[in-house]
Image: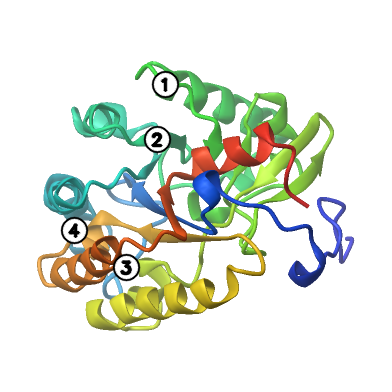
């Protein structure tokens, strides 16, 4: 088993060519909202507390709250602030939560692929099985009227073939590799594939569920990350992806701190910030021949 990979080479962020985001802006911020479904009676899934038996009604129902209530609460917030998001959609959402995927589309969110469901990790599939999964997910999401150009693997799970398969199926970018603050190019057997930054730090699931922080702390993390990146962006363009899960951040007690920090940032109207989507970041980089 190799201890390395051939997807990208080492490149310190301090030595790369500088460029701008559209309009001369320097910090691109996008909200990546994970719209996920899980299996009842088994499969993978984040846990609020240890399960005792299957079916694990407590944890299943807690996760399902996000699709029934939490996401609609977040939509209200995003609408008030005039924010589009990157909707990271499990394809099974289309059948399991009628109207949810369409609501993402109709409010103008970017539709990005997030596997079939979050009950399974794709990295354990055979090459043929993974190829079929990517093809079927792409076709199902394209039925909404927008073919996805970006992919986030459920549980950030990849096989050694995943980037090659995504490029072969026409994907422009992947969010699995949280190794940089700028889009970088991954080598594949079918041409280049962009890695767009997706944070595992400014991400409510590890912050709140694994590190046992709360909404106020998570909001403070967003505030501090933006402050630091703004202090650097005169030297280089950077990206901040804010990862949200409606069953976590859509809980009633967590929305107010999230609303406060997003409203503060929006009202500051800093000309250096580009509020955007992961897909528009990838398009700007590709269309202008950028990325290390």
Q: Residues within 10 Å of mark 1 (few under 14, many from 20)?
A: some
* 81 displayed left or right of 130: left
Residue drawn 35% across the image and 32% down it:
92
Between disc 1 and disc 3, the foreground one is 1
Q: Earlier in the sequence, mark 2 or mark 3?
A: 3
Look at the picture and state if 190 lies above or below 43: above
Res 197 → quadrant: bottom right
CA–CA distance in space, label 4 to label 1? 34 Å
Q: Which residue is mark 4?
A: 57
CA–CA distance in space, label 4 to label 2? 32 Å
Between disc 4 and disc 1, the foreground one is 1
Q: Element under label 1? A: loop
Q: Quadrant of the N terminus?
A: bottom right
Q: Earlier in the sequence, mark 1 or mark 3?
A: 3
CA–CA distance in space, label 4 to label 3? 11 Å
Look at the picture and state if 137 lies above or below 192: above
CA–CA distance in space, label 1 to label 2? 8 Å
Between disc 4 and disc 3, the foreground one is 3
Q: Earlier in the sequence, mark 4 or mark 3?
A: 3
Q: Earlier in the sequence, mark 1 or mark 2?
A: 2
| Residues under numbered marks 4 and 3 in contact, where contact means CB atoms less than 8 Å apart | no
Q: Position of residue 97 (x, y in %)?
A: 21, 34
* 143 displayed left or right of 58: right
Q: Element under label 4? A: helix
* 147 displayed left or right of 20: left
Q: Which residue is mark 1?
A: 146
Residue nearer the viewer, 181 or 48: 181
């Amino acid at each position: 088993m190799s201890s390395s990979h051939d997807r990208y080479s080492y490149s310190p962020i301090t030595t790369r060519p500088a460029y701008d985001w559209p309009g001369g802006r320097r910090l691109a911020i996008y909200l990546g909202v994970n719209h996920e479904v899980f299996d009842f009676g088994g499969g993978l899934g984040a846990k609020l507390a240890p399960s005792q038996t299957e079916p694990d009604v407590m944890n299943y129902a807690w996760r399902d709250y996000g699709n029934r209530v939490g996401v609609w609460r977040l939509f209200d917030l995003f609408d008030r602030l005039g924010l589009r998001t990157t909707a990271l959609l499990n394809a099974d959402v289309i059948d399991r939560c009628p109207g949810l995927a369409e609501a993402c589309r109709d409010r103008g969110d970017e539709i990005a692929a997030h596997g079939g469901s979050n009950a399974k990790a794709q990295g354990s599939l055979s090459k043929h099985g993974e190829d079929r999964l990517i093809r079927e997910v792409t076709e199902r999401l394209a039925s909404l009227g927008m073919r996805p150009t970006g992919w986030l693997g459920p549980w950030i799970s990849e096989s050694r073939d995943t980037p090659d398969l995504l490029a072969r199926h026409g994907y422009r970018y992947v969010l699995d590799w949280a190794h940089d603050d700028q889009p970088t190019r991954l080598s594949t057997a079918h041409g280049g594939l962009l890695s767009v930054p997706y944070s595992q730090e400014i991400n409510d699931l590890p912050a709140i569920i694994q590190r046992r922080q709360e909404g106020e702390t998570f909001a403070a993390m967003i505030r501090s990350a933006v402050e630091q990146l703004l202090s650097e962006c005169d030297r280089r363009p950077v990206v901040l992806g804010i990862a949200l899960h409606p069953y976590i951040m859509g809980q009633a007690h967590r929305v107010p701190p999230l609303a406060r920090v997003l409203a503060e940032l929006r009202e500051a109207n800093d000309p250096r910030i580009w509020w955007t989507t992961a897909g528009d970041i990838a398009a700007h980089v590709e269309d202008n021949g950028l990325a290390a």
